[in-house]
Every structure is written in C-alpha cells, then in structure tokens.
Amino acid sequence: MWKVIIRRVLLMIPQLFILSILVFFFAKLMPGDPFSGLIGPHTDPHEVEALRRAAGLYDPWWEQYLRWLGHAIHGNLGMSYNLHEPVTTVIGQRAVNTFWMSLLSGILTYLIAIPMSIVAARNEGKWQDQLWLTYNSITFGIPPYVFYL
C-alpha cells in the first residue's frame, strides 16, 4: 500500500510541474496584463509603465516563469491589484465559505440521491422508476452554466 502511495505522490510532482507551465502560459496568452484594469481616463501612462517594469513583465518568459514558480512554491501568490491585499489572504478568507458550501452540497446530494435510488430500485420498471430515470436524464442533460443565468 505504501508503494502505491509513494508512487502516486512521485507521479504528482511532474504533473504539477506541467500544470504550472500550462497555467503560466495560458495566463500569458490572455489579452492585457495585470495592470490593464488599472488604466482609466486620468491614469498616467508612465505610472502604469513603471508598474510593468517593476513587476518584470518585460523580462524574458523563462525568467518570469522561474520567478513565478519560486514565489508560488514559497506560498507567495502576489498582491491583488483590485483589493490591495495578498492573494493568499483573499483565498484564505473565501476558503471557509467554500468548505461549508461544499459540505452542505454533499449532504444535500446524498439526502436526495440515496432515497431516490432506493425508491427506483424497489420499483424497478414501474412508474416511480421511470419518474426518477426521466428526472435524472433531464437534469444531467442541462449544462451547469444554465443555472447561473
């Protein structure tokens, strides 16, 4: 059992490295930069340019990646330019609510799914089974983003 755990942990290291490269490059492909949102009608362009130089946005991509990776490994995810707080603080503030929402969602899912499965299994081929089968087919066929509209 320990061999399986160690092997999976060791396989996770290159996967995380590849994922970090993908995240970095997809972030670089997005239009604009972290300071584009700060530009307004009264913003001094030289001020924004100084911020870009201070952040190292004109350095070669590999220097930017290694700097980003080093900071991320040490837990420094940078500053939120909108909230003017460290990103780790912002994530930490929201993590508690995310945990409780996930827990409640899981509990509600099982409170509905287990009785529904029992009713469908006890009434196989009857109208109750067909009702739950239809309900599941419809709800699984709806994309999740529809609920956010």
Image (spheres, rainbow, N blue to C red):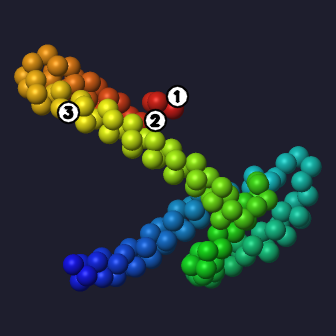
Instruction: Locate the N terminus by quadrant.
Output: bottom left
The local secondary structure at tag 2 comes to: helix
How many labels sit on residues? 3
| Residue ID at (28%, 35%) | 113
Of callouts 2 and 3, the N-terminal one:
3
Relative side of 100 to 131, left or right: right
Q: CA distance from mark 3 to mark 1?
A: 30 Å
Do the residues bearing badges 2 and 1 touch, measured as CB atoms within 8 Å? yes
Which quarter of the picture shows residue 78?
A: bottom right
Q: Is residue 25 above or below residue 129?
A: below
Determine if residue 115 is in view.
yes
Of callouts 3 and 1, the N-terminal one:
3
Q: CA distance from mark 2 to mark 3?
A: 26 Å
In the image, residue 119 lies at what x, y percent? 18, 27
Disc ID at residue 102: none
Disc ID at residue 149: 1
The local secondary structure at tag 3 comes to: helix
| Residue ID at (46%, 30%) | 147
Q: Which residue is mark 2?
A: 145
Please identify, in this view, whether the residue under mark 2 or under mark 3 is nearer the observer.
3
Which quarter of the picture shows residue 16?
A: bottom left
Q: Amino acid at mark 1?
A: Leu
Q: Is residue 106 above or below residue 20?
A: above
**Circle 2 Cα neighbour tier, 10 Å, few/some/many (<14 / 14–19 / ≥20):** few
Q: Amino acid at mark 2?
A: Tyr
Q: Amino acid at mark 3?
A: Ser
Q: Which residue is mark 3?
A: 117
In the image, residue 53 lies at what x, y percent? 79, 74
